[in-house]
Amino acid sequence: GIASAVAGLTFTAFVQEANEIKFTAAAADTIRNAASVSASAGNIRASTVGNVVVLECINTTEWFVKSIIGSWTLT
């Protein structure tokens, strides 16, 4: 999973093999990509080689997608 949200933290992930990777937010945290937001303890996942996501924590409960390449699923 991703560390508990602390404003200013960043997290970068990339898919290097054709296997799904999934990053889950901590219990009360969410992940936002533009107008879409995950449930509490939601996740973001992808399985296509070359996909990249950069998450930045904007407060004590929200991770925000700062940059994204490829298709990532937010739940």
Image (cartoon, helix red, strand yellow):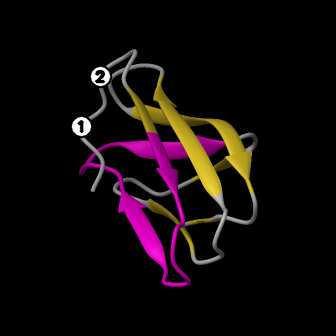
Specify the label residue 6 is tagged with: 2
Q: Is residue 52 above or below residue 17?
A: above
Determine which quarter of the picture holds residue 51: bottom right
Tell me if label 1 and label 2 are in contact, CB under 8 Å. Answer: yes
Which residue is drawn at the image coordinates 36% and 23% (left, top)?
9
- Residue 18 lies, in percent from the top left, at 56, 84
Determine which quarter of the picture holds residue 57: top left
In magenta, the rendered stretch is: 12-33
Specify the label residue 43 is tagged with: none
Q: Is residue 44 above or below residue 8?
A: below
Quarter of the image where the N terminus is located = bottom left
Specify the label residue 4 is tagged with: 1
- Amino acid type of the residue that numbered disc 2 sits on in the rendered structure: Val
Q: Secondary structure at mark 1?
A: loop
- Amino acid type of the residue that numbered disc 1 sits on in the rendered structure: Ser
Question: How would you rate the neighbour count of disc 1 (Cα within 10 Å): few for under 14, some for 14-19, many for 20 or more?
Answer: some
Quarter of the image where the C terminus is located = bottom right
Which residue is drawn at the image coordinates 74% and 40% (left, top)?
34
Which residue is drawn at the image coordinates 44% and 45% (left, top)?
30
- Residue 60 lies, in percent from the top left, at 32, 23
Label 1 to label 2, Cα distance in Å?
Answer: 6 Å
Residue sitting nearer the eye, 50 or 38: 50
